[in-house]
Image (cartoon, helix red, strand yellow):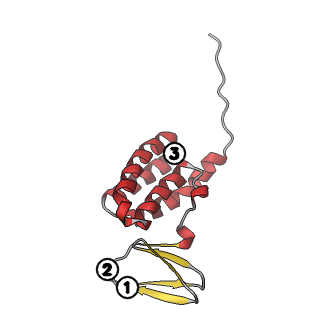
Amino acid sequence: MSKAMQLSLKAGDRVFINGAVLRTSRKVTLELLNDATFLLEGHVLQPEETTTPLRQLYFVLQAALMDPHNAGAAEKLFGNLLYRTRAAFSSEHILSGLTSAEALVEAGRCFDALREIRRLLPAEAEILARPATPIVAVAA
């Protein structure tokens, strides 16, 4: 890591660092002096929040970061789920973002892949909020 990373946390905040869960008892600033994988509590999805394809994909990658011992299995699941998620969307914006996320995972940069997927969530929400177009049968 070329530059130290500072995390400012309030009392009761949790942060997940290299698979460990830390909770603060008071306001604190942590300075990470070397490479570490971390997730702030605000970026952690709970299982009941995995209600869309992209949120499910995010959750699987999140599991890889939070449990480094099982990261290989989670990344394999990510690949399988990614294939199905791509089939669910026709949006070039989302498909391009998924390609970027896949490349980041393959490069060992799961944290950056999470950020990429998180960036796609508003577009997914917009697509899912649109009323479905009815399919009209054509008489032969």
**x and y percent of residue 68 in the render?**
37, 66
Q: Quadrant of residue 64?
A: bottom left
Instruction: Look at 47% across and 64% down and name the residue there.
Output: 115
Q: Amino acid at mark 3?
A: Ser
Asked which secondary structure carries label 1, the reply is loop
Of callouts 1 and 3, the N-terminal one: 1
Q: Which residue is mark 2?
A: 1
How packed is label 3: few (under 14 Cα within 10 Å), some, or many (20 or more)? few
Question: Whole-percent x and y of residue 65?
Answer: 41, 65
Q: CA distance from mark 1 to mark 3?
A: 38 Å
Q: What kind of element bears circle 2?
A: loop
Instruction: Say which mark, if any, is on residue 4.
Output: 1
Splitting the image into 4 quarters, where does residue 34 fall? bottom left
What amino acid type is highlighted by mark number 2? Met
Q: Nearer the viewer, mark 1 or mark 3?
A: 1
Q: Give yes or no for contact between labels 1 and 2 (Cβ–Cβ under 8 Å).
A: yes
Picture coordinates of residue 11, whole percent (x, y) = 60, 85
Mark 3 or 2, closer to the camera = 2
- Please state, as top left, top right, bottom left or bottom right, where the N terminus lies in the image: bottom left
Q: Residue 60 in the image: x percent, y percent?
A: 46, 56
Q: Residue at x 66, y 34 (%)?
A: 133
Q: Is residue 91 above or below residue 20?
A: above
Q: Label 2: few (<14), some or many (≥20) within 10 Å?
A: few
The residue labelled by disc 3 is: 91
Q: Is residue 8 left or right of residue 37?
A: right
